[in-house]
Amino acid sequence: MSDLPITSTGLSPSQQRTLALAAVFQSAKLVHLLATQGAAALIFHGESYDYLLKQSLSDTPVAQRFQDPKALRAGLAALERGLLQPYQTVPETKKFKKNQVLYYATNLLLIERKIFSQEVLVQLIHRELLTLRHRHHFFSGDLRHPALLAGFANLYLNTAGTLKMRLNVRGQPAELTNSANVDRIRACLFAGLQAAQTWHALGGRRWRFILGRRQVLVDLRVLAMQDRVVSIKT
């Protein structure tokens, strides 16, 4: 698939795909942090978390999602690490920490395809997202309200939880048995599935991720430069 010219957003189609893929990795990174640190992870990463949940509720066209490199800094960094890390020598004792985010992200890409190939699950997502948007409005836009997070968590269970393929989250037992934190993790996993669906709708394919590594790295450098320019201006 050849890329179209630069869009009205100033991003090329390739860069838009890279930002959507970064959103998947940001979800994966946050899942790892929540599983190991619990709610404390949101002290430094709360804005990244809120951004993903807000995008999950969005009904804007696919081409208008995930266009803010600044809001996806954590995901862009995690994506770059995921692309480079398999080619670096890592001491055996550090492999678990290095690979867990990559494991979550790649599995979210696989699970998303299985979910969105089933019309029943797609229709379920559409219906439940409408309910969650109303709930979000009812709670005055509070993206971390327990009722909203529980709704996201149930939606993840009712879709990804019905598949034979499962994503196993590893972390601290105390954080994985805390019901409120489990809801946060599942909400973040659902946000990752939504981002993966956006990536696929924009032309993202597994071969692009595996064989197109160099182009993604080029996109990451350009997006990082754009982020710096915006930060300096503001």
Image: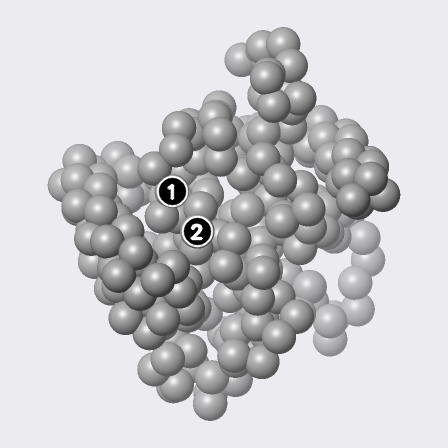
Q: CA distance from mark 1 to mark 2?
A: 6 Å
Residue 104's place in the image compared with 119, above or below, is: below
Q: Residues within 10 Å of mark 1 (few under 14, many from 20)?
A: some
Instruction: Report the number of numbered marks.
Output: 2
Residue toward you, 46 or 156: 46
Q: Is residue 119 left or right of residue 112?
A: left
Which residue has dot 2 on it?
Answer: 54
Q: Secondary structure at mark 1?
A: loop
Task: Estimate the x, y position of residue 86 in percent, counting from the top left.
Answer: 72, 50
User: What kind of residue is marked 1?
Assistant: Ser
Task: Estimate the x, y position of residue 123 in percent, counting from the top left.
Answer: 17, 40
Which residue has dot 1 on it?
Answer: 58
Task: Estimate the x, y position of residue 15 in percent, counting from the top left.
Answer: 64, 28
Q: Is residue 129 left or right of residue 109?
A: left
Residue 94's place in the image compared with 176, above or below, is: above
- The quarter of the displayed image where residue 113 is located: top left
User: What kind of residue is marked 2?
Assistant: Lys
Task: Identify the residue at image location x=28%, y=70%.
Answer: 147
Label number found at residue 124? none
Labels 1 and 2 touching (C-beta < 8 A): yes
Residue toward you, 40 or 84: 40
